Image: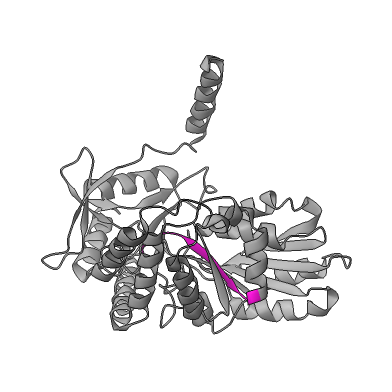
Amino acid sequence: MSLERLNATLVEEVAALEREGRAKAPERVIVGHVPASDGRGPRYLLQGSDQEFLRMNSNSYLSLSFHPAVLAAADRATHRFGTGPGAVRFIDGTSAEHTVLEDRIARFVGRPAARAFNSAYTSVLGMAIALSTSDTFWVGDELNHNCIIRAMRIANVPKEQRAIFAHNDVADLEQQLASVPSGMGRVMVIFDGIFSMRGDNAPVNDILEAVAGHESRFRDGVITVMDDSHGIGAYGPTGRGTEEFCQARVDVLIGTFGKAFGVNGGFVAASRELVEAVRQKADTYIYTNPLGAADCAAAVAAIEVADGPDGRERLSNLAARTAQFRDGLRGLGLESIPGPHPVVPLLVRDTERTRAIVRGLFDRGILAVGLTFPVVPRGSETIRFQVNAAHTAKDISQVLDALDELR
């Protein structure tokens, strides 16, 4: 059967996205990497351009993707196990590298057990599928990541069994918990550790205090779940994430190897009993190929680096460069959301101005992400900058100088 009619409809659907301002721009293609030199951090080459670009839009907070130990670990594992797992975990797709990674990340985040997925996104989906029952009620922050929102739908959570509390508003969370019907057997409170577009963190201590008052109302209590993908490795004195920053511990921790650790994949960490239930019941674990052995080995090497002297040095530079950038924005009279995380939003509050600044930065060899209406409400237009450990003082000064010119 011909696709002509479907193609015509799809073209119109994409055109509608473009008219609404929601269509994605063509993807830029990175074709090369220029190592750090002369006081500058790494630069990147894009297809169709001779210019070198400074990335201020990368999740690789510890800049470990080119670390020799990480590259060597991936190479050794590839030669030992090949480039792919060849099957799902239940059909002999589990290599020794998977089990080593799960043990290492569990120890890093201080949990009895962990289970690796091929992304943090699928980790959240799998966790929701595994832990949802007909009498489970979910409560989430209004600014939760798309994966959490999608997880509720995939887990078939009815509208009457889920609620939203205002962003980081613990008083509203208390009200939502008080409104949960008494017939529910289990309540899941789920939130991001670091909110990826704002760089602010969940008030974990206050959330746990609010939850404690409702534990006895439900058969299985109230379970806290935090997706700390932007926190693990990059936040807290030793990179343990939002839990370490807040000195508080949630029940279920979800994270990624694809941001601070610079590799790929995600994980769920919790009690052995919960992790085994996820292994048995999570569709996104059971029915899809896992990470390859090279990714697992590289992630283990990255965790080892992050957990040692090199990692502390990188965290120290990350904090210093983040402070330099935040202080510089204040010095220029530009608006941001305060906090120590390396996600640094610049609040422009105008769509055309945001687009103009992003274009101006690009022309000056700087890559950053602009969020404009209707993706965000009018008046909330933002440019998101992300500081990395490989950035130098000279790099941050270059960005601040460019913003000064573009004010």
Farthest residue to the right: give it.
Answer: 183
Residue at the image position 44 percent from the left and 39 percent from the top: 24
Which residue is more in the foreground, 161 or 271?
A: 271
Which image quadrant for residue 114? bottom right
Q: Position of residue 21 (x, y in %)?
A: 48, 36
Q: Position of residue 303 (x, y in %)?
A: 39, 74
Location of residue 16 with respect to 391 vertically, above or below: above
Q: Which residues are magenta?
A: 261-272
In the rendered structure, the answer to whether residue 199 lies left or right of residue 279 reads left
Q: In this rendering, does residue 195 appear at all?
A: no
Q: Position of residue 291 (x, y in %)?
A: 45, 57
Residue 382 drawn in magenta: no
Residue at the image position 49 percent from the left and 80 percent from the top: 107
Q: In the rendered view of the protein, which quadrant contains the N terminus?
A: top right
Location of residue 158 with respect to 243 vertically, above or below: above
Residue at the image position 29 percent from the left and 64 percent from the top: 76
